[in-house]
Image (cartoon, rainbow, N blue to C red):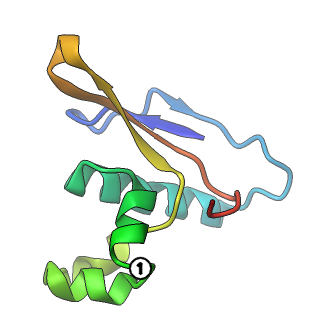
Amino acid sequence: MNITSPNSNQLPFHACSHPGTTPGNVIWVARKCATVLRWVVSSYSTHKKFEADEENLWRKFALGPKAGEYAIHSGGVLVMWGVFDGLVAVVVVSGLKQE
């Protein structure tokens, strides 16, 4: 689990607690977080919109060599709070089932 501050890209919380967690999960977390921050929707919402076709997303937004920085799989969600006028954090988990 990872909690990221969207404005400063600071990482106030990060934990690996599920059995079987690998260094690869950290990469997935970063990619899901980048997706949430760029499109300001959950990573699963992006997954559904592009019908799980990351290459379609990459082409549509002309991501080129940066395409691998984004992942459209479930696990990344926004934390919004009206007092702060919008996005205050991104929470991401990795290693669970898509739904």
* Residue at x 25% of width, y 77% of height: 66
What is the quadrant of residue 56 in the picture? bottom left
Residue 32 position (above or below residue 92):
below
Q: Kindly identify the amino acid type of the residue bearing the numbered disc 1.
A: Glu
Q: Is residue 92 left or right of residue 84?
A: right
Whole-percent x, y for residue 99 in the image: 63, 59
Q: Residue at x 32, y 59 (%)?
A: 35
Instruction: Determine the image quadrant of residue 87.
Output: top left
Above or below residue 20? Residue 70 is below
**Counting other residues with Cα less than 10 Å from the Cα at mark 1, is it few (<14), some (14-19), or many (20 or more)?**
few
Dot 1 falls on a residue whose secondary structure is: loop
Question: In what quadrant of the picture does the N terminus appear?
Answer: top right
Residue 41 visible? The answer is: yes
Q: Which residue is drawn at the image coordinates 23% and 33% (left, top)?
A: 8
Residue 26 in picture, x, y percent from top left? 57, 56
User: Which residue in the rendered view is the most extreme toward the top?
Assistant: 83
Residue linked to disc 1: 51
- Taking 97 as reference, is 75 above or below it? above
Q: How many circles with numbers are drawn on the protein?
A: 1
Left or right placement of residue 81 versus residue 15 in this view = left
